[in-house]
Image: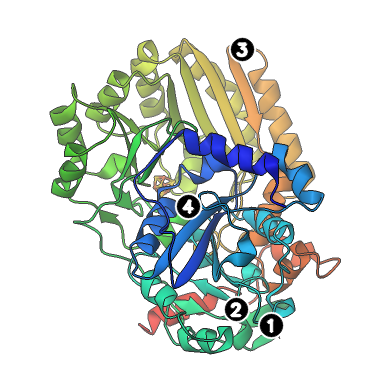
Amino acid sequence: MISRRLLALWRRYREGERASIHPPEAWNISVLLVFPNVYSVGVSNLGFQTVFKILNKTPGVSCDLLYLPDEEAIPSLEEGQELCSFYLERTPREFDIILFSISFENDLINIVKILKLAGIPPLSSDRDENSPLIMGGGIVPSSNPEPFAPIFDAIYLGEAEEMLPKVIADFEGVSKKAYLEKISKIPCIYVPHLVETENIGGFIIPKVQKVRNRWRDFKKLSNASYIISNYSLFKNAFIVEVSRGCPRKCKFCLSSHVYSPVRFVESKALEALLNEAPTEKVGFLGTSVSDHRGLPELVKKYSGRLTFSFSSLRIDAPDELFQALINSGAKTLTFGIEAATERLRKAIGKPLDDELIFQRIKELSPHFPNLKLYFMVGLPGEKEEDIDAFSSFIKRVGECFEGRISLSISPFVPKPMTPFERVPFEDLSSLKSKIRAIRKAASGIKRVSVNYELPKWSQVQALISRGDRRVGLYFASAIKSIDKGVYLEALEVETLPWDFLRKAESLNL
Ligand code: SF4
């Protein structure tokens, strides 16, 4: 029996949606596209929506969605009631292919949870021909697929647009085994169980050279929302993608190093989307919105007809973009500052001057009641004085900004494919004491609040980020323990689990 609580939850979310794409009710191949996090996060993800659209436009394919059920529905599922898809209300086991879209490392834990709730063994080695084929893709496995290798039958590397429809269409009329052998020959498809591994310096390393990420030239073909939802983090806004990648390439930033080369959508393509915007609210999305040369002109041209928000604006973004944000009635100004000293910001590749930061915050203070600043602790090259500097930094922000100020602190997590991929993840007690020091520094100013990510969860993120197949087995509860130090300390081994992606790119495969 399908969980009534889950059905009620999905119906509530569907009532808050305007969707221009629905899964066809007849198909040759049925795909369940899963976002392994809750609805509000998944429906806000334009990449996820784009895959939903391109699969439903593929002849013979019907693609339905699934999100991680909210806590309110979990007890009924754990008692044995069935999970079901979002639109057609079918159980996951009824689909031919289950495809996970992964944006966050810790979603590996949710993937295992969803498979178990669906009655599907989480490890590929425990599944047979009768089980749906389980695939994964997204920025996280595209930067290091290895922790996902024991779970997925196949992993799609890179951006979905070009190859995914063909890869899925190839499933028609063949056995799972024959299909996996066939698609394993496509360069952006990685079939982990067909690849031998070797132990090098304590890491399980795949012996593979033929896979590579696949990136799309989308200058003229921007993406925009196909589902607009009340419950989205962008609250009923029409989301338009303006860029992929970021030319700044801060040394810690995964998306700027994985989404390469940097691509900006041409202004003409953006105009075409703005002319057809189904809502007055438009959200521009991209890792380098602030660097799009045509955006200031576009927001000027459409202001009055449309209001604009931005997935992120750098503090040195053009004035016109901040004016557009003021006009939109946005209440919160958000910046990634990362470190409290100029020296450390420079060392991590984000060289923002103190004067620029404080001057911009002061200019914008009259227009926004809230200011949110993001920082990291445990950064490579961080010294005691960088933590001590929070005290004067917070005081100065308090002098420049009159409204409420919130500081969001995250432990730094080294990411694969970035210049910091080999640096250590700091130990938990040191991270906790740095966070404590920042909270104390902020405690003297009433308008300032500090929230932070628990270091133990950042440690899980670091394990998955730089993990190998053993890490996947550990989080799938197939092995009881791992030597965490192997993955968290400075990586001095010559070969890393994800190096094969780089090798294949240099061979131009
Ligand atoms: S400016 Fe932002 S998006 Fe660009 S590289 Fe730096 S952190 Fe990443």
- Residue nearer the viewer, 102 or 339: 102
Q: Are marks 4 and 2 in contact (CB under 8 Å)?
A: no
Q: Are marks 4 and 1 in contact (CB under 8 Å)?
A: no
Q: CA distance from mark 1 to mark 3?
A: 52 Å
Residue receiving disc 4 = 253
Q: CA distance from mark 2 to mark 1?
A: 7 Å
Crowd band around label 3 with a 10 angstrom C-alpha radius: few (<14), some (14–19), many (20+): few
* Dot placed on the residue nearer the N-terminal end, 4 or 2: 4
* Dot placed on the residue nearer the N-terminal end, 4 or 1: 1
Q: Considering the numbered disc 2 on the image, is that residue within a helix, a strand or a loop?
A: loop
Image: 100 above or below 235: below
Q: Considering the numbered disc 3 on the image, is that residue within a helix, a strand or a loop?
A: loop
Q: Considering the numbered disc 1 on the image, is that residue within a helix, a strand or a loop?
A: strand
Amino acid of disc 1 = Ile
Q: Are marks 2 and 1 in contact (CB under 8 Å)?
A: yes
Residue 422 in the image: x percent, y percent? 60, 64
Residue receiving disc 2 = 495
Amino acid of disc 4 = Cys
State the image quarter where residue 476 is shown: bottom right
Residue 449 in the image: x percent, y percent? 62, 20
State the image quarter where residue 334 is shown: top left
- Residue nearer the viewer, 407 or 118: 118
